[in-house]
Image: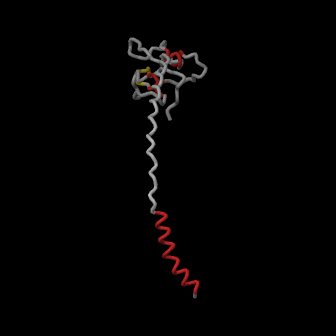
Amino acid sequence: MQTRRTFIGLVPLASVALLAACSKKVEPVPEVPPPSPLPAPPAPAPAPAAAATTTTTTAEGLVDPTSPKAVELSFVLDDETSKNPKHVAGAECSNCALYGGKPGDASGPCPLFAGQRVPAGGWCTAYTKKA
């Protein structure tokens, strides 16, 4: 029983010693100034000018087949005059999925030519048959 009594007598002494050791005033660490802010990144370079893909219109208000975008797409005002090997008989703007005109309209808007009007009988290499 001596050991248990000794232990019980030592616990309060150890607690007081532990509290005394932990209660010592610790010197505060000097505050380090925050780092200076990084300089702002340089402004991005302006985008290069886009290639000339604008289209012009004919006197009738239709896409000009000699405009850069029309030439790029091998656009023709009359599908029967197309010499492009991709052209198949009967493929024309009026039955293309991109054509925005109504059935029977002589011309209609086309998103490939920034909404300009294309003739219903025209054709280009972007032709996609309506489903």
Which image quadrant for residue 89? top right
**Residue reaching furthest to the bottom:** 1
Q: Nearer the viewer, residue 7 or 63?
A: 7
**Residue reaching furthest to the right:** 85
Which image quadrant for residue 62? top left
Query: Coloured how?
Result: secondary structure
- Name the side, left or right, on which 28 lies relative to 88: left
- Name the side, left or right, on which 55 lies relative to 87: left
Instruction: Please report the residue visible at 49 percent of the width from the left and 12 percent of the height from the top.
Output: 66
Relative to residue 6, is residue 37 depicted above or below?
A: above
Instruction: Please report the residue visible at 48 percent of the width from the left and 31 percent of the height from the top.
Output: 97
Number of numbered tags placed on the structure image: 0
Q: Nearer the viewer, residue 97 or 38?
A: 38
- The image position of residue 73, as x and y in percent, is 53, 20
Q: Quadrant of the N terminus?
A: bottom right
Which image quadrant for residue 63? top left
- The image position of residue 108, as x and y in percent, is 40, 24
Relative to residue 24, is residue 7 depicted above or below?
A: below
Relative to residue 74, is residue 6 depicted above or below?
A: below
- The image position of residue 120, as x and y in percent, is 44, 22
- The image position of residue 32, as x and y in percent, is 45, 42
Instruction: Please report the residue visible at 53 percent of the width from the left and 77 percent of the height from the top.
Output: 10
Q: Nearer the viewer, residue 80 or 84?
A: 84
